Image (spheres, coloured by chain):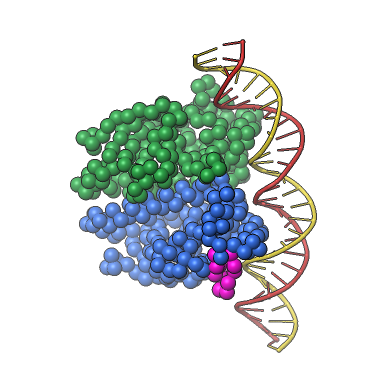
Chain colours: A green, B blue, C red, D yellow
Amino acid sequence: MARIATSVDSEVGRPVVSEGEPADHVFNVISGWLKVFKLLSDGRRQITGFLAPGDFLGLTHNDTYAYSAEAVTPVGLCRFPRKKLEALLEELPDLEHRLLSRASHEIAAAQDQMLLLGRKTATEKIASFLLLLSRRAADRGQPENPIELPMSRNDIGDFLGLTTETVSRTVTQLKTKQVIKLLEGHRVQLTDVDRLRRLSEGE
Amino acid sequence: MARIATSVDSEVGRPVVSEGEPADHVFNVISGWLKVFKLLSDGRRQITGFLAPGDFLGLTHNDTYAYSAEAVTPVGLCRFPRKKLEALLEELPDLEHRLLSRASHEIAAAQDQMLLLGRKTATEKIASFLLLLSRRAADRGQPENPIELPMSRNDIGDFLGLTTETVSRTVTQLKTKQVIKLLEGHRVQLTDVDRLRRLSEGE
DNA sequence: CGATCCGTTGAGGTGCGTCAACGGGAGTGG
DNA sequence: CCACTCCCGTTGACGCACCTCAACGGATCG
């Protein structure tokens, strides 16, 4: 795969892919964080996911992207021309198998997110989000506690279907209850993971 | 594929797969409608999708199902042992390719649904839902108007992140505005598709 | 040292949830 | 044939979780 890859960087806030543009490239995140989102015509935004190192961006079978993505922190990416990647799939059935496995995980994650968006309260949403970040950090071999929280309150709100203010208030509540503790450098200590887990499911 | 398939039926309300059970089978819907859903411990429910003929159920790379599914109408299914299906994938790379394509569409649909759940109003949700059913009926080669609406108000609510009452009230409003018309046998005539499309995006 | 962005906090409003009542259709039993 | 129950959809009255609007302080940057 290295044969067809180019390395690209992106600054914070700069679009990496834009909804409706030709889907010519697939990306693999090397470093930093991205957000993937969809917009309504009046500007309402839903972030459908945050991408961290190891995640793929732009895997689609349409000819245009169905979403936009931009950097949350400075980002390093590996870029593949989609045509060449598809040619490569013909030769390497195992690669396709791994992509299918990824896609299947992504579908499961999307279903969890639908449950969150449709049926959870603000507190449950925030608690679930913190636990999700912790779990994903562990999957990447990073410390699961404290966790990095590089995105803004606004971004968190747009991921959880809340406003900035509600995110802020709810985080403050968790802090007051001593379930979490805000640290330097956009990091969060989960001081009572069991309680957080119970809060995330409404018990 | 016919070699490894068995045909099974299911009555309305009977579980076809249950969250947490071993994921031993994959199903293909032959006739009727199913709902796929996840539950919270206190009974809150999110329906993540309705399945119609041609759709797959149970494609996962985990060893247990992450969701439950049951029949909305009497259902005919084609059942495949997952092990045998996976063995078949080794022989038929093209089958894997088609499954990946399906998965990619499912991810795109899930992202649309996240936008709906997180950011749309009740009216926008209902309008989007009716248009979705119309589009999917067309994809299956069925009339796109009037559409079939075999699921209950409660199911629609659990799909859209609303209550039965709000679904009922919102549908009544659309009826009063003469954007839709309820017909015999759980069917709905979309009398003003343009208006419905505008309503679905909040314009 | 102004300008901008972000997070926080407060006061007040509202869209949708909750609770309750009612009517119609389907099934069941006499 | 009616009487009864159950389930579903509808409608009304009311409440509340979250949104909206506003103000303010701290950090960053020219």
Q: Please say whether residue B188 is one of the residues in the magenta stretch.
A: yes
Could you tell me what secondary structure mostly forms the magenta stretch?
strand
Nearer-the-camera pick, A72 or C14? C14
Q: Is residue B68 above or below residue A144?
A: below
Nearer-the-camera pick, B65 or A63? A63
Instruction: Tell me if B95 is positioned left or right of B32 in this view.
Output: left
Measuring from the top left, give residue D7's x and y in whole percent.
62, 68
**Residue drawn at point x = 34 percent, y = 69 percent:** B6
Q: Is residue A73 above or below residue A125?
A: above
Does the image show residue B64? no
Answer with the quarter of the image where residue A161 lies.
top right
- The quadrant in which the N terminus of chain B is found is bottom left
**Residue drawn at point x = 33 percent, y = 58 percent:** B82
Measuring from the top left, give residue A203's x and y in whole percent.
61, 44
**Residue drawn at point x = 60 percent, y = 37 percent:** A163
Answer with the quarter of the image where residue A4 lies.
top left
The number of numbered badges drawn on the structure is 0
**Residue drawn at point x = 42 percent, y = 49 percent:** B108
Measuring from the top left, give residue D18's x and y in whole percent.
64, 41
Measuring from the top left, give residue A5's x and y in whole percent.
26, 34
Nearer-the-camera pick, A27 or A38? A38
Instruction: Tell me if A94 is positioned left or right of B54 in this view.
Output: left
Which stretch did the figure color magenta? B180-190
Q: Is residue A91 above or below residue A27?
A: below
